[in-house]
Image (cartoon, rainbow, N blue to C red):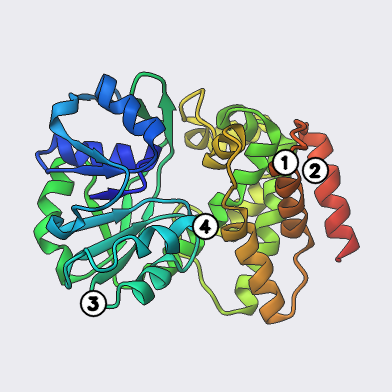
Amino acid sequence: MVVGAGSIGIFVGGKLAVAGADVTFVGRPRLLDEITASGIRLTDLDGGDDSLPSGRFHVATEPDDVGSADLVLVAVKSAATAAAVRELTGKIRPGTVVLSLQNGIGNDTVIREILPNCVVLAGMVMFNVVHHEGGRFHRGTEGGLAVQDDPGLTSFLGVFEQAGLALDRYPDLRPVQWAKLLLNLNNPINALSGRPLREQLADRNYRRCLALAQREALAVMNRARIAPARLTPLPSTVVARLLTVPDGVFRRVFGRVLAVDPMARSSMADDLALGRKTEISWLCGEIVGLGAMVGLPTPVNQRLIELIVAAEQGDRRTWTGAELFDQLRAAHASGR
């Protein structure tokens, strides 16, 4: 069962269904109606193309049949975690494996507190999915699924591998989550830019914005003795410095970063476009909270929060790279 049938949930659940799993998608009627009418088509930047007719999966707006599920994937936005998981209480079988596939830090802890009798594991989706009309969901970037290892996953490893989503298992997923959080600090920048990811990342001024946010995050993580995993060929500290190089140099050194679907945008950009609350509190907010805990100011990430909140409240202006960099550079200089 997939709780949170958005782009990520439908892509992962759909791939598992193609591999033969019996999958139920739980989510909002808008997307459920779409995939029921058209079926699901799953494509990717490597040329993959799978079709799943509506008779090959189930849909529901409430997780009433979760008692029959062997595996539950939680893919709701972080703000909705507690409310969504409470809907499972009294219905889910004790011992059921519940895998969080969400951004941010600590969603698995929230789930574990609500479902103490289940095997709750942290997970991370390391790729971007673009939703196109007509039930098409496109993986627009490289990456796989990273999960906290546990014997409870053993019986599911084969179907994930057959689905082309082999699980990268870690004894401790927290370093991976912090490393992914560093990458996700680009989400608000992309959302404020109004541009596709490839176009935004090709612009040095937007990358300088990301570098400011990442350097600030790395400073507070270092103070807190948090060592992020290395998800890229170079350490995070080196990547943060190289983000600021001229565009031509960046294209030569980081060409793979720009090898994404030309229309791919961050999930935060999608949320703003749909008038939904974003996950900014679970991204930049994590850095601001950690900074307060260790006694280091985080004005850059705080300013990104303010700009996203303003956009959520209707101030939907599009920021050029130079304008946004001026905002964040001024915040950094103020040290507030």
Q: CA distance from mark 1 to mark 2?
A: 17 Å
Name the amino acid type tagged 2: Phe
Viewer-closest of 64 and 116: 64
Examine the rendered structure and indicate whether residue 251 appears above or below residue 280. Answer: above
Q: CA distance from mark 3 to mark 1?
A: 40 Å
Q: Which residue is mark 2?
A: 325
- What residue is rendered at 59% in x and 36% in y? 269
Q: Nearer the viewer, mark 1 or mark 2?
A: 1
Residue 204 quadrant: top right
Q: Which residue is mark 3?
A: 117
Upstream in the sequence, badge 3 or badge 1? 3
Name the amino acid type tagged 3: Asn
Examine the rendered structure and indicate whether residue 141 appears above or below residue 184. Answer: above
Q: Which residue is mark 1?
A: 311
Q: CA distance from mark 4 to mark 1?
A: 17 Å
> Residue 20 appears at what percent x and percent y?
9, 39
The quarter of the image holding the C terminus is bottom right
> Residue 170 appears at what percent x and percent y?
30, 66
Upstream in the sequence, badge 4 or badge 1? 4
> SS at mark 4?
helix
User: Would you say the residues marked 2 and 4 are in contact, meaning their CB atoms lie under 8 Å apart?
Assistant: no
> Residue 114 appears at what percent x and percent y?
36, 73
What crowding class fits label 3: few (fewer than 14 Cα within 10 Å), some (14-19), or many (20 or more)?
some
Q: CA distance from mark 4 to mark 3?
A: 23 Å
What crowding class fits label 4: few (fewer than 14 Cα within 10 Å), some (14-19), or many (20 or more)?
some
User: Would you say the residues marked 3 and 1 are in contact, meaning their CB atoms lie under 8 Å apart?
Assistant: no
Q: Which residue is mark 4?
A: 79
Name the amino acid type tagged 1: Ala
